[in-house]
Amino acid sequence: MKHIKLRDLDVSRIGLGAMGMSHAYAGAGSDDAESIRTIHRALDLGLTFLDTAEVYGPYVNEELVGRALRGRRDEVVLATKFGLVSHTGRKDGADSSPASVRTAVEGSLKRLGTDRIDLYYQHRVDPGTPIEETVGTLAELVAEGKIRHIGLSEAGPDTIRRAHAVHPVTALQSEYSLFTRDPEARVLPVLRELNIGFVPFSPLGRGFLTGAIRSADQIDPADFRADNPRFARENFAHNLRLADEVAAVAGEIGATPAQVALAWLLAQGDDIAPIPGTRRVGRVEENIGADAVRLTREQLAKLSDLPPAAGETHTEAQMRLIER
Ligand SMILES: NC(=O)c1ccc[n+]([C@@H]2O[C@H](COP(=O)([O-])OP(=O)(O)OC[C@H]3O[C@@H](n4cnc5c(N)ncnc54)[C@H](OP(=O)(O)O)[C@@H]3O)[C@@H](O)[C@H]2O)c1
């Protein structure tokens, strides 16, 4: 698999998001053995970039990843996130105060069974703590060898600049896909100016772009997508048409829709490493196969010209923590 650099951090240009193995999707946590096989298969196929977070579960997803990496820790760039679990008693969960970050990192290191986190992201910007204070603490953790690189997630241009002025930021992780083009206008130009890498999350539109979801009735009420505006009945038909356009391009080249959605993202720059999520061996094989998919200039243009998906990417409450 081709590798790229997120600033000076080398990663396979397709990573694996572990969230859905333990969190958010209906059925999460029901087959840890298959999830661990999925991680091992990804590593065997040359994938070196794994993504988890303290809040997934909470905690159990990091434990699962830690179990999967026993004896294989050095094969991966291991990324996790802090800041959506408060360790100082805040009620809404968002907490990037120095005391909370210090507690969080010790817990993540323990659960992941490692002595260092390769890329440690703030999960959401904390309105209650100046970003300079948070990044100052992260810089201390770098100096102590507990983390190697600093990342942000769903931070806007101003926060990115302020954070980067305190300590170099290696990567921003935010939602980006054929469904969610928001980062293109204001965020990507700043990342390129500052030489910060970009890690698109939910690159398959939470499964929608793969063509596997054809009706709102397919979403289990226990699944977090049941509340997600993108999957609401009033937006479904519009978004299904977009997924059908992706499937049409896939049909032209004998690839799958998931591979086309990923290949389009990969074509947006050599500073981009998406982290599609799956808990199934067959799907991780399919998604890694996107590394070999080449889209023509015409296909790329056609996909880039698609209108945005209908409906916000998150619920109203979740949107309040997202900077644009
Ligand atoms: N920073 C943040 O705030 C944030 C937010 C969300 C996610 N993330 C990270 O980004 C990763 C990926 O995002 P995501 O899981 O939200 O969305 P995604 O990668 O866009 O989609 C995952 C969904 O698509 C399904 N899927 C995966 N490959 C498929 C294929 N080839 N064919 C059909 N269906 C397929 C998965 O189901 P199966 O598992 O059943 O295959 C799952 O339901 C997460 O694991 C997490 O690490 C970060």
Image (tube, helix red, strand yellow):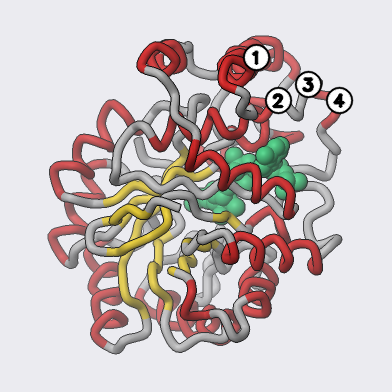
Q: Is residue 1 visible?
A: yes
Q: Residue at x 47, y 71 (%)?
A: 76
Residue 209: x and y in percent read 62, 27
At mark 2, the secondary structure is: loop
Residue at disc 1, secondary structure: helix
| Mark 4 vs mark 2: in front | 2
* Label 4 sits on residue: 217
Q: Which residue is mark 2?
A: 211
Q: Which residue is mark 3?
A: 214
Mark 1 neighbour density, 10 Å: few (under 14) some (14–19) many (20 or more)? some
Q: Are marks 2 and 1 in contact (CB under 8 Å)?
A: yes
Q: Which mark is residue 77?
A: none
Residue corresponding to mark 1: 244
- Tally the numbered discs: 4
Quarter of the rendering occupied by the C terminus = top left
* Amino acid type at image mark 4: Asp
Q: Secondary structure at mark 3?
A: loop
Q: Residue visible at 43% across and 34% down?
A: 265
